[in-house]
Image: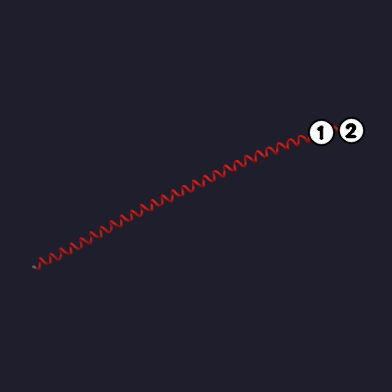
Amino acid sequence: ARRMSDLEDLLLQMEDRNEGLQAASRTFEKSTQILELALAERAEACDAAWGEARAQRAHYEAQLVNVRNVEAARAAAAAADELQSHQALQRMQQVAVVKASEEAKLAKRLESS
């Protein structure tokens, strides 16, 4: 009888431990679910941040293209101004050569007469 009582006590202890283990298992499963949800939320936040970063990069790249286009336009305008100045200088030199030539011809005529 005593042995039966010891076995019953042992069985009760094992059932208590089993219930404790099952409770711990349920707690672990709930914690795992909570962690999985948190991880999924973080992943969504990271995806959103990544998308925003890509959009900002595209915006900055477009601004850089605009800046480069403005710089190229300014350089082209400066080159056009320089070319116009050079052409104006050439015309003035041509006019001066023509005038000098005409003056030399007039001076020869005056000397001849």
Give left or right: position of 68 versus 43. Answer: left
Pointer 2 and pointer 1: residues touching (CB < 8 Å)? no
Quarter of the image for residue 47 reads top right
Instruction: Report the Cα–Cα distance between label 2 and label 1.
Output: 14 Å
Establish if 109 lies above or below 38. Answer: below
Report the quarter where the N terminus lies: top right
Extreme-right residue of the structure: 1
Where is residue 75 drawn, in percent x and y? 36, 54
Residue matched to label 2: 4
Q: Closer to the camera, 29 or 109?
A: 29
**Which residue is located at x 62 percent, y 42 percent?**
40
Give left or right: position of 59 versus 97. Answer: right
Q: Closer to the camera, 91 or 33?
A: 33
Dot 2 amino acid type: Met
**Which residue is located at x 70 percent, y 39 percent?**
29
Residue matched to label 1: 13
Extreme-left residue of the structure: 113
Q: Closer to the camera, 104 or 30?
A: 30
Quarter of the image for residue 85 reads bottom left
Report the quarter where the C terminus lies: bottom left
What colouring does the structure picture have? secondary structure
